[in-house]
Amino acid sequence: MSHSHKHSHTHSHPDLKGRNLIISIFLNILITVAQVIGGLISGSLSLLSDALHNFSDVMSLVVSYIANLLSKKQASDKKTFGYKRAEIIAAFVNAATLMVVAVILIKEASKRFLEPQEIESDLVIWLSLLGIAANGFSVLLLKKDADSNMNMKSAYLHLLTDMMASVAVLIGGLLMKFYQIYWIDAALTLSIALYLIYMGYDLLKDSTRVLMLFTPNSIQVEQIVEAIEEITSIKNVHHVHIWQLNEDEVHFEAHVDFNEDIRLSEFDIILGEIEQVAFHNFGINHVNIQPEFNKPDSKQVIVQD
């Protein structure tokens, strides 16, 4: 079975990713401590809920940082892929925690709707401004890498939603200060929770697809089979598997029937053609082909192993 791969070098320097995560971790520890103290003093549920979300941010950022470190480790005879999936696992864990935090917030908001409480709005306003500033800076640090890395996107989403939560808390604090609308605290908590679910669902779904070895959404199996079968001397392409290892690697493996009993040197030339089709037309950078001639196996495109 022949195997080859191509790599794209468009991702950011990993040391910058690690540095940005460390800065964001310390900023969120600062915000969490300040908001817990402020929430207890003021009695603001939305401020405490924001602190809870910030604490989840700290944990998610730590998970992302560890995953970023692990992803750089070299492969070995016991770990032939190394830790290339570490960042995908981190993205899955972080997306799942977004959903858990959201459920907790919905539960607490429901209680506060039934029993509204007077809140020290001045403290809420100042601490929400701190949250907006610190999380806004962290969001800017991670935004670039979030576009190309699922792990960084999970950390970015935690910070982005928390910045928006701080904006909501600020609005609530102003409404409570000037209009004494205290139920707005619970309403904003509920809206934060629903937004967390909305943002976290897609990331949870995408990371699950990668972990379950599903075919990437951007690739149609029938199209790549048809494209390869157009190459001269190829009779049939079957037993196809396509999966995404991480953000940078998409793998394709298949059995290929040939019209004639060709030599190995001829197969190498054809393999090069298959690689070009897979890479340039479908973005696949790892190709693994099992050549066959008159082998009596199943010729179905997808075969249950």
Image: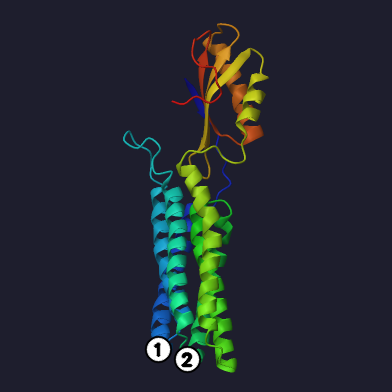
Q: Give the percent coordinates (x, y) of residue 134.
A: 51, 74
Instruction: Say which amino acid is labelled 1.
Output: Ile
Q: Would you say residue 20 is visible in this rendering?
A: yes
- Tell me whether the residue at label 1 lies in contact with that at label 2, contact meaning CB atoms closer than 8 angstroms: yes
Closer to the camera in the image, 109 or 271: 109
Which mark identifies residue 41? 1
Closer to the camera in the image, 111 or 7: 111
Q: Give the percent coordinates (x, y) of residue 249.
A: 52, 39
Instruction: Say which amino acid is labelled 2.
Output: Glu
Bin the neighbour count of mark 2 within 10 Å (Cα to Cα): few under 14, some 14-19, many 20 and up: some
Q: Give the percent coordinates (x, y) of residue 128.
A: 51, 81
Bin the neighbour count of mark 1 within 10 Å (Cα to Cα): few under 14, some 14-19, many 20 and up: few
Q: Give the percent coordinates (x, y) of residue 120.
A: 47, 91
Q: Residue at x 39, y 61 (%)?
A: 62
Closer to the camera in the image, 227 or 134: 227
Label 2 SS = loop
Q: Would you say residue 138 is visible in this rendering?
A: no
Tag count in the figure?
Answer: 2
Closer to the camera in the image, 215 or 16: 215
Where on the picture, by quarter, is residue 56?
Answer: bottom left
Compared with residue 7, is residue 171 higher up or lower down, i.e. above or below?
below
Q: Residue at x 55, y 49 (%)?
A: 11
The quadrant of the image that shows the C terminus is top left
Q: Is residue 132 left or right of residue 83?
A: right
Mark 1 to mark 2: distance in Å? 8 Å
Q: If you read the primary sequence from the N terminus, does the residue marked by circle 1 or circle 2 appear first? A: 1
Label 1 SS = helix
Q: Residue at x 51, y 91 (%)?
A: 122
Which residue bears the numbered disc 2? 120
**Residue furthest toward the front?**
114
Q: Residue at x 47, y 86 (%)?
A: 116
Compared with residue 54, is residue 95 higher up or lower down, i.e. above or below?
above
